[in-house]
Image (spheres, rainbow, N blue to C red):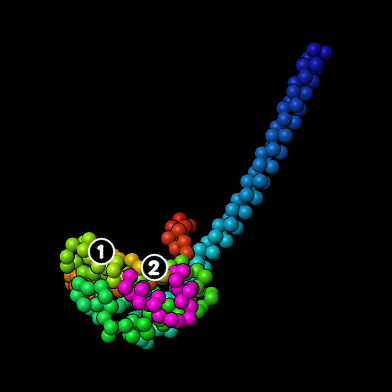
């Protein structure tokens, strides 16, 4: 009987020790679970904050386009997708040439000056602007390299002319403006899907936001 009692006492003690060990394990797991839940809460808040920031940044482009349309919409057509303005090359240049026609310079000065100034004078917007881009485009007549050189020279001619003018905010513009040639990579098509060779010959003025591509990628991931 004594051996039986001692055996049962030893068994009870063993159970108590195992329960104490399990209690300690449960406490550790509970603490880990609590820490995980806290981290999850913090990450959820950070995610919501990031989404809000991305939304605000993507809203900047809409603001800029809306501002340009309100200020310039009566005098020129603003692309509702990217805020670009389009100037026909057959007005600015003779065919195959890259020097600006003298007759087009006053109209160019008025149109582009208003576009630049609308962006640069607004402090809420201009801090988000990365570049103001002058793009030269050609139609598909001729080789790619010939048109690439021609489109680059035309874009540069427009930029050179604008920077030769004396106007307020010129120094701010110098830090932002770039000239780029696109050859015939971005043609314009008519309603039948055929390249409109006259419309494709153009100069486009557009803006880009700081980290715009990264913002788009992040926004897509967060969705």
Q: Secondary structure at mark 2?
A: strand
Whether residue 206 is visible:
yes
Residue positioned 35% across, 68% down in the render: 179
Q: Secondary structure at mark 1?
A: helix
Q: Earlier in the sequence, mark 2 or mark 1?
A: 1
- Left or right of residue 151, residue 159 in this image: right
**Residue at image mark 2:** 178
Q: Are marks 2 and 1 in contact (CB under 8 Å)?
A: no
Tell me the chief SS of the magenta region: helix
Residue positioned 19% across, 75% down in the render: 95
Alpha carbons under labels 2 and 1: distance apart:
16 Å
**Residue at image mark 1:** 148
Q: Is residue 165 magenta?
A: yes
Quadrant holding the N terminus: top right
Whether residue 59 is visible:
no
Disc 2 crowd rating (10 Å Cα; few below 14, some 14-19, many 20+) is: some
Q: Residue furthest bottom?
A: 74
Q: Is residue 140 magenta?
A: no
Residue positioned 70% across, 32% down in the render: 22
């Amino acid at each position: 009987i004594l051996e039986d009692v001692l055996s049962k006492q030893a068994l009870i003690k063993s159970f108590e020790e195992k329960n104490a060990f399990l209690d300690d394990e449960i406490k550790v797991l509970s603490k880990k679970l609590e820490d995980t839940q806290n981290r999850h809460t913090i990450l959820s808040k950070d995610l919501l904050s990031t989404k809000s920031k991305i939304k605000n940044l993507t809203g900047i482009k809409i603001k800029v386009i809306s501002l340009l349309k309100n200020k310039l919409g009566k005098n020129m057509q603003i692309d509702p997708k990217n805020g670009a303005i389009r100037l026909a090359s057959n007005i600015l240049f003779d065919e195959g040439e890259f020097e600006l026609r003298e007759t087009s310079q006053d109209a160019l000065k008025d149109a582009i000056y208003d576009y630049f100034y609308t962006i640069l004078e607004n402090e809420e917007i201009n801090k988000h602007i990365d570049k103001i881009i002058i793009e030269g485009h050609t139609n598909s007549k001729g080789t790619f390299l010939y048109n690439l050189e021609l489109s680059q020279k035309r874009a540069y001619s427009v930029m050179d002319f604008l920077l030769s003018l004396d106007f307020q905010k010129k120094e701010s513009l110098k830090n932002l403006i770039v000239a780029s040639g696109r050859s015939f990579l971005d043609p314009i098509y008519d309603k039948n899907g055929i390249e409109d060779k006259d419309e494709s010959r153009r100069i486009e003025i557009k803006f880009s936001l700081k980290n715009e591509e990264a913002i788009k990628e992040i926004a897509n991931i967060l969705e």
